[in-house]
């Protein structure tokens, strides 16, 4: 008998709010854990976004705390305030309305490379998984709640799906929670591995063949069924009540 892996066989049915919670919690374990920082949005296609609220860390987030906001950043559903830095997401969804999911945070290695203003190469296959093109936004001027600065950053990304925001952190886009999770994990691993290679005195020249990196760059992040699902199951085992309330 041949087993054909599908998401439906690997996870229970999840609402978008539940996916957002599990995305936040699984990525907290991967280093996306800069205290209260970080925003995840899911574009509902009706002029509103699901979003994690301000004042709740990603590792304690629950579905009942997820808020819904409009493209002005006003809370239209929920009991918590919107994150301070949400203009980055508001401008992203205005300028690129087809983008379904977006994530911003300050993971250690991704932020170090953004601080240095360098784009590290993918040094191994796992660091290239999830696909997408990585851009460096070399000038992130203005405060995190500055709409003009946010718009300039999104414009500087062009059509890239991942970005290092100079002096700020990372920005990851995708068509699903699975795609954003895979891309975010791979981006931090890419940044970590490149840092270790440089620290060890090795050359930052990717050994991966061009055909592989080109194929990965064109990937929509949806093809690796099983990775996101396994990390969700790990989170559900660690906190069986995470989706309650």
Image (cartoon, helix red, strand yellow):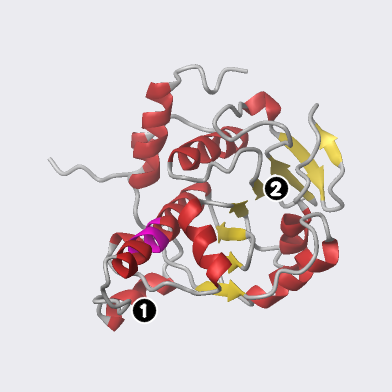
In the depicted view, which residue is nearer to us: 232 or 164? Answer: 164
Q: Position of residue 191 (x, y in %)?
A: 42, 62
Residue furthest left in the image:
1
Task: Give the number of marks.
Answer: 2
Which numbered mark, 1 or 2, is in the foreground of this view?
1
Residue projecting furthest to the bottom: 210
Give residue 74's position: percent from left, percent from top: 87, 43
Which stretch did the figure color magenta?
189-193
According to the picture, the residue beneath numbered tag 1 turns out to be 214
Query: Which quadrant would residue 171 be assigned to in this image?
Result: bottom right
Please report the residue visible at 52 percent of the width from the left and 22 percent of the height from the top.
Answer: 242
Alpha carbon separation for disc pair 1 and 2: 31 Å
Left or right: where 49 falls relative to 241: right
Q: Position of residue 79 (x, y in %)?
A: 80, 26
Main secondary structure found in the magenta portion: helix
In the picture shown, does residue 2 fall above or below 58?
A: below
Find disc 2 in the rendering and name its residue.
44
Q: At 76% from the left edge and 39% from the top edge, which residue is drawn? A: 68
Answer with the quarter of the image where residue 143 lies. Answer: bottom right
Q: Position of residue 184 (x, y in %)?
A: 47, 54
Density class for disc 1 (Cα within 10 Å; few <14, some 14-19, many ≥20) is: some
Q: Between residues 186 and 42, which one lies in front from this camera angle?
A: 186
Q: Does residue 232 lie above or below 90 as drawn? A: above
* Rendered position, 158 above or below 90: below
Q: Is residue 36 above or below residue 218?
A: above
Quadrant housing residue 17: top right
Classify the position of the C terminus by image quarter: top right
Judging from the image, what secondary structure is the residue with disc 1 in?
helix
> How packed is label 2: few (under 14 Cα within 10 Å), some, or many (20 or more)?
few
Judging depth in this view, the residue of 18 and 208 nearest the camera is 208
Judged from the image, the secondary structure of the residue bearing numbered disc 2 is loop
């Amino acid at each position: 008998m041949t087993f054909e892996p599908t998401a439906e066989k690997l996870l229970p049915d999840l609402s978008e709010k539940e996916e957002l919670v599990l995305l936040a919690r699984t990525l907290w374990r991967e280093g996306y854990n800069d205290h209260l920082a970080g925003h995840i949005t899911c574009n509902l296609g009706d002029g509103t976004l699901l979003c994690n609220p301000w004042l709740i860390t990603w590792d304690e987030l629950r579905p009942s705390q997820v808020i819904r906001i409009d493209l002005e950043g006003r809370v239209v559903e929920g009991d918590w305030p919107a994150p301070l830095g949400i203009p980055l997401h508001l401008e992203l969804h205005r300028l690129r309305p087809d983008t379904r999911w977006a994530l911003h945070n300050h993971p250690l290695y991704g932020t170090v490379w953004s601080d240095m203003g360098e784009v590290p190469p993918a040094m191994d296959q796992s660091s290239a998984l999830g696909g997408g093109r990585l851009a460096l936004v070399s000038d992130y001027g203005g405060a995190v709640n500055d709409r003009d600065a946010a718009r300039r950053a999104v414009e500087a990304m062009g059509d890239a799906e991942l970005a290092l925001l100079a002096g700020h952190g990372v920005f990851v886009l995708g068509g699903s929670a699975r795609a954003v999770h895979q891309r975010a994990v791979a981006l931090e691993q890419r940044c970590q591995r490149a840092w270790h290679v440089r620290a060890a005195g090795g050359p930052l020249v990717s050994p991966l063949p061009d055909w592989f990196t080109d194929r990965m760059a064109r990937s929509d992040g949806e093809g690796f069924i099983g990775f996101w699902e396994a990390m969700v199951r790990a989170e559900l085992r660690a906190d069986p009540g995470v989706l309650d309330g």
